[in-house]
Image (cartoon, grey):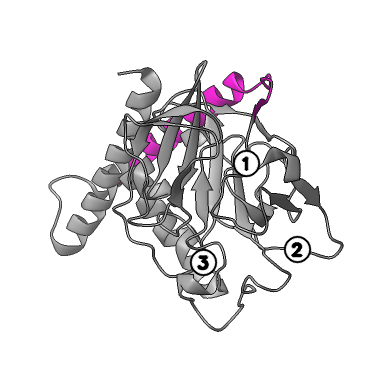
Amino acid sequence: MSVQKLLMVTQRVCWVVFFALVVTSLVTELPFSPHWVWLPAALALAIVVELSRRARRVHAHRPPAVEVEAPVAGRWSALNSPADKVPSHGVHGYGQTYAIDIVAEPETGARPAFAWLWPLARRNSAFPAFGAPLFAVADATVVHASDGRRDHLSRNSLAMLVYMLLVEASVRDIGGASWVVGNHIVLDLGDGTFAMYAHVQRGSLGVRAGDTVRAGQQIARCGNSGNSSEPHVHFQLMDGPDLDTARGVPFAWRGIGVPRNGETFTAGSTEDSSQAPSPASSQATSPAGETALPTQGD
């Protein structure tokens, strides 16, 4: 077990012990001073600081981008893009330093707007991204594929977003990477580069671990599993298959590049998004005034 892996596992164990002690202290008297209850939490926070320090040192020099095909077809919009900031999701953990979130925008207004008060949540079918096909970005070997976790309701209202950020995200982080990214696929692209697709739709897998895939082959569908505020695609490249130890790798989509936050782009065939994307028909645009609330995908 690597030092990175050991630190990640120890951090989760510390949080579990801390919360267990807190709950126990509420129902019975502990055989030691209550101050000791905070020791596991302090250790967990110290590990977080150390992991952050190690990540900053590793990512001090940005490696060159790896060019791959787009993982979707049709018209989409970018959120939490590494073209705007790095790390794109605020942290280096789980190999998401250069990750990107994208939401389907087949036409302006097709995606439900953020609700400040009501409705609290929406069904996934209200979002055009839900069920959209996902494609292999290169010839690759499938090293992980899972789709057993449920697709939950959206979290795109103020109350539900606060709940997700303050409660749900913390619980999922303690549970580990698979609780955060939900159903996901990891592809080995060769040369030490791996692609990860998160929040895959339950029961949509078209591949399994050990399969070989060709660029443009449909491998699953977009869902809303894991730590996600709405159906969207979280895509990233990394240098290993284990999310606990992987480091992010910059990407560029062929014919598109890396779209910025709020920028719309069209990949593949707009007439039939179930077909493999064609680099020749990819384009990106930045319509004035188009904004979007960042989708939480980490």
Residue drawn at x 82%, y 53% as measured from the top left: 285
- Name which of mark 3 and mark 1 comes first in the sequence: 1
Determine whether the residue tagged by mark 1 lies in a helix, strand or loop: loop
Q: In which quarter of the image is the N terminus?
A: top left
Instruction: Name the foreground residue: 287 vs 289.
Output: 287
Q: In terms of sequence position, does the residue under pointer 2 or pointer 3 come before the other?
A: 3
Which quadrant of the structure image shows residue 76?
Answer: bottom right
Residue 291 shows which numbered tag? 2
The one nearer the camera, 131 or 120, is 131
Identity of the residue drawn at 41% across and 40% down? 185
Query: What's the distance in space between the residues labelled 2 and 3, CA to CA?
Result: 20 Å
The answer to whether residue 84 is visible is no
What distance separates the C-alpha of mark 2 from that of mark 1? 22 Å
On residue 98, which mark appears? none
Q: Is residue 228 above or below residue 84?
A: below
- Residue bearing mark 1: 70
Kindly identify which numbered label has been placed on residue 162: 3
Give, as a three-letter code, the residue at label 2.
Thr
Which residue, as the protein is rendered here, is positioned at the far bottom? 118
Question: Relative to 272, is 252 above or below?
Answer: above
Residues in magenta, as a range: 38-67
The residue depicted at 35 percent of the width and 53 percent of the height is 171
